[in-house]
Amino acid sequence: MNPLKGRAIFFVTRNINKFNEARRVLAEYKIAVAMLRLKTIEIQDDDVENIARMRAIDALEKSNLPLIVEDAGLFIKSLNGFPGPYSSYVYRTIGSRGILKLMGDVDDRSAQFRSVVVYCSPEEQVRLFRGVVDGKIATEARGSSGFGFDPIFEPEGGGGKTFAEMTIEEKNRLSHRSKALRSFAEWYKGMR
Ligand code: ITT
């Protein structure tokens, strides 16, 4: 029996910002979460859900602990959903500035962040929880908090601020990640 079992859920990620957001959301449900910096296989797929599912199964095989992984992507309507499942690579290569360039002065700036949280444990089946936030790509980068594409994404209901102009609490009221995590937390609490 693993001595860490039953104490907390492990969030497998190498992104500290993601972990900090998740920790606060889950704390509202009194769910303790620890960061597990495990390197997992990252399959190539057009579907964020498949990528997350495979990562979760791989992480479970490597750790044998109850865990969640979360994968997210930015889907821009006028770019036919790009960068979507390739968000991480696109962020590392052309970044927010590159996206702004690609958008030029396109009128329809609608975009969506999508998140999928995958839970699995040695005893239970794999479970998926989804969260989405609609918004717009800003015309210039604004704000310095958060990470990734936060400076160029204005969520609906955010009063025109970008995610990077918000505190973690404000972002957590609106974000794709917080919605997927809340859906997970409701289910998890109901199970125990
Ligand atoms: P993992 O270790 O958990 O995989 P990651 O940084 O690779 O962390 P994802 O694959 O889930 O995270 O996210 C892909 C990219 O999408 C990420 O590098 C960001 O550029 C962007 N992204 C995801 N969620 C975001 C958010 O809440 N705000 C801004 N950008 C986000």
Image (cartoon, rainbow, N blue to C red):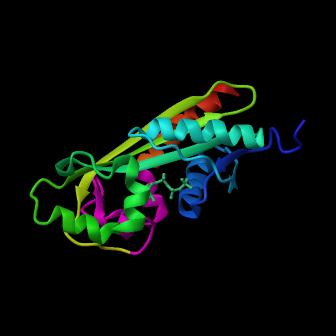
144 w.r.t. 158: above or below? below
**Residue at 24 percent of width and 60 percent of height:** 137
Q: Quadrant of the C terminus?
A: top right
Tell me which corner region of the image, top left, top right, bottom left or bottom right, holds residue 95. Answer: bottom left
Residue 66 seen by the camera: no
Residue 3 seen by the camera: yes
In-image side of 78 versus 82 (left or right): left
**Residue at 36 percent of width and 70 percent of height:** 165
**Residue at 59 percent of width and 44 percent of height:** 69
Q: Position of residue 89 (x, y in %)?
A: 42, 59
Q: Position of residue 33 (x, y in %)?
A: 68, 49
In-image side of 69 versus 59 (left or right): left
Tell me which corner region of the image, top left, top right, bottom left or bottom right, holds residue 29. Answer: top right
- In reply to whether residue 160 is colored magenta, the answer given is yes
- In reply to whether residue 12 is colored magenta, the answer given is no
Q: Quadrant of the N terminus?
A: top right
Q: Between residue 79 and residue 167, name the one nearer to us.
A: 79
Q: Position of residue 30 (x, y in %)?
A: 66, 44
In-image side of 101 versus 85 (left or right): left
152 w.r.t. 18: above or below? below
Q: Between residue 40 and residue 97, name the one nearer to us.
A: 40
Q: Position of residue 68 (x, y in %)?
A: 62, 42
Give the magenta part as a residue range: 144-173
Q: Residue furthest front?
A: 44
Q: Between residue 163 and residue 52, name the one nearer to us.
A: 52
In-image side of 24 versus 84 (left or right): right
102 w.r.t. 142: above or below? above
